[in-house]
Image (spheres, rainbow, N blue to C red):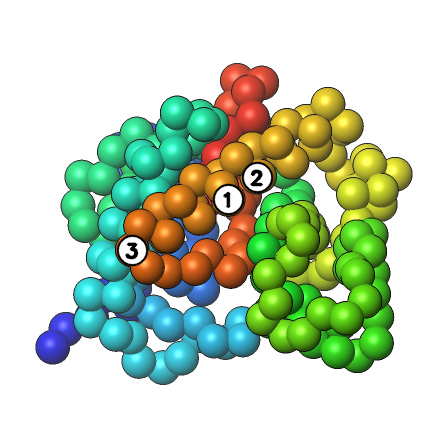
Amino acid sequence: MQTITSTNFNFPKQKSVYKGKVRDVYNIDGKYLVMVASDRISAFDVVLPKGIPYKGQVLNLIASKFLNATKDIVPNWLMGTPHPNVSVGKMCEPFKVEMVIRGYLAGHAARTYNSGKRVLCGVTLPEGLKENDKLPEPIITPTTKASEGHDEDISREEILKQGIVEEKYYVQLEKYTRALYQRGQEIANKMGLILVDTKYEFGLYNGEVTLMD
C-alpha cells in the first residue's frame, strides 16, 4: 500500500516550502498556507524510515474537525480542507510558545513530580498526589517553541520577562487555552474518554490572536 512521505508541489504565487517532521507547508504569496499532512511518522524528534498509510489523512481531518468545533471560542487559521491530506488557511505570525494545559498528573508532569519537584513552569503542585490523579484545577505549563530539538519548559513570568509574548496577548492565550481545554473535555466525555492534557499554538492574524494548532 502506498504512502505519502514527500511532496514536491509548485503552486501559483508559491514563495517557499517548509518541510517539517510530518507536514509540508507551502507559503502562497506570503498570505496563505497550503499544509500537506504526510504519512511520515516522527518519534522523539526522529522521522522513521517508513510511513503509515492514511496516517496523514487521519491527522489532517481530526485537526480540521476540532478547529471547526471550536471556532466559536477563538478565530483559527483554517479556511478549508480541499483534500483529506490538505488544509488551506491564513498565514499567521506565530507566538514563540506552546500553551500546554494539564488536567491530570501524567506524563512529563508526573515524572517531574515523582522526581521530588513541586513547581512546574512556575505552578506549585500540592503534596500527596499520585500519578494519573486529577489535578484540583487544570494548570497551564507553557513550553518554548523550538525549531529543532526539544521544547523547553518555561513559566508565565519568564515569558513576560523575556518579552517572548506581550502581556496583553498572553492574557488572551491563557483565556483561550482554558476555554479550548474545557470544550475538549466536554467532547471527550461524550465519547467516554478523558482529555488528560493537550497543547495549543497561537499566532497573530491582522492583529488578532488566532488558533493555529
- Nearest to N terminus: mark 1 or mark 3: 1
Q: Mark 2 highlights which residue?
A: 177
Q: Residue at x 77, y 28 (%)?
A: 167
Front residue (pair 154, 114): 114
Gap in angstroms between the C-alphas marked 2 and 1: 6 Å
- State the separation of the CA atoms marked 3 and 2: 21 Å
Q: Position of residue 137 (x, y in %)?
A: 65, 49
Q: Amino acid at mark 2?
A: Thr
Which residue is drawn at the image coordinates 51% and 60% (left, top)? 196
Q: Which mark is residue 139?
A: none
Amino acid bearing label 3: Met
Residue 140's place in the image compared with 114, above or below, is above
The residue identified by callout 3 is 191
Question: Would you name the residue on which mark 1 appears?
Answer: 181
Q: Is residue 104 left or right of residue 90?
A: right
Q: Nearer the viewer, residue 167 or 79?
A: 167
Lateral position of residue 18 relative to residue 121, left or right: left
